[in-house]
Amino acid sequence: MMNIGIDAGGTLIKVAWMKNGSPEFKKFPVARMEVAAAWINELGNARICMTGGKAALLQSKINQKAAEMVEFEATCSGVRFLLARNAISEESYILTNVGTGTSIHHVEGDKQQRIGGTGVGGGSILGLSRLLTGLSDYEAIVQLAAKGARDRIDLKVSHIYEGAEPPIPGDLTASNFGHVLQLASIDDLTEEERLASVMGLVGETAATVSVLAAGQCRVSSVIFIGSTFIGNDLLQDVVKRYTKLRGATPLFIENGEYCGAIGALLSLI
């Protein structure tokens, strides 16, 4: 009998199963939940465990009764699996999951504690991008943002201390979108510039709160996972750079967005 782990989140439904001892993955947009349910029903008499905020809604659309798992426990279990699979030895670390919003956990061995989070995440990228440019297609937003520069929109520490040595690194952002106030007009700001600054805001916020959590928990490593990083090299670069600037070590693991689904799957094995 086939075992299936499902993480039904706010934006994506992620599915994991094992094939010849290796995990296989599939994802559906939440907007296509009916398609996801039809795919699951075609599997027949599978054993299923679900997690995530949309799990109850998905359960109502499939034929077989699924077991349930707390989302945070499933995610941390999936992270431990992927770390071991990639021969990464981290016993104590901050786990930051950047999905629709951002959730932050302290993981130590087999124990995990949710430290907090922020409403700034992938949903913020989509919402702010639509407000600033009218665009709502995620892939188009990511592609355009990668071509943009933030110099005319974001206020850097070096801008404030122009001509003087700043007391903190000049590359740090003093105020996201704060440089706009010094522009005579914003009409010539391109979509690329606006979207790059949105990525900067989200990435720097996720990195900053993660590093603060790392300091509170006395760890140096932050593992970043989540669907918002899929195909989004710019966001990853912002997070990596800012985390290092703030004094912590950023780590990304392949297929990290499927950690919740993997954890749900492992509960069946």
Image (spheres, grey):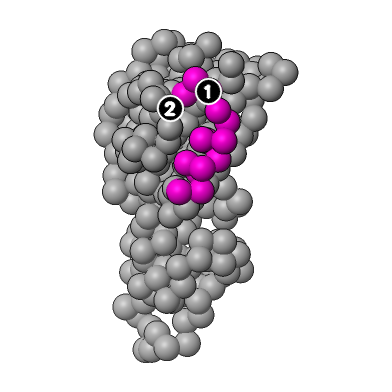
Horizontal side of 210 relative to 24 (left or right) equals left
- Which span of residues is magenta-colored? 34-48
Q: Whole-percent x and y of residue 42? A: 57, 36
Question: Residue at image x 39%, y 25%?
Answer: 65
Sort mark 1 into few (<14), some (14-19) or many (20+) by Cα contacts within 10 Å: some
Question: Residue at image x 46%, y 72%?
Answer: 135
Task: Confirm whether the magenta stretch covers residue 43.
Answer: yes
Residue receiving disc 1? 45
Q: Are marks 1 and 2 in contact (CB under 8 Å)?
A: yes
Residue receiving disc 2? 64
Residue type beneath disc 1: Asn
Mark number, residue 164: none
Q: Upstream in the sequence, badge 1 or badge 2? A: 1
Q: Whole-percent x and y of residue 127? A: 36, 64
Real-space CA distance between mark 1 and mark 2, rounded to the nearest whole angstrom: 7 Å
Q: Is residue 60 above or below residue 269?
A: below
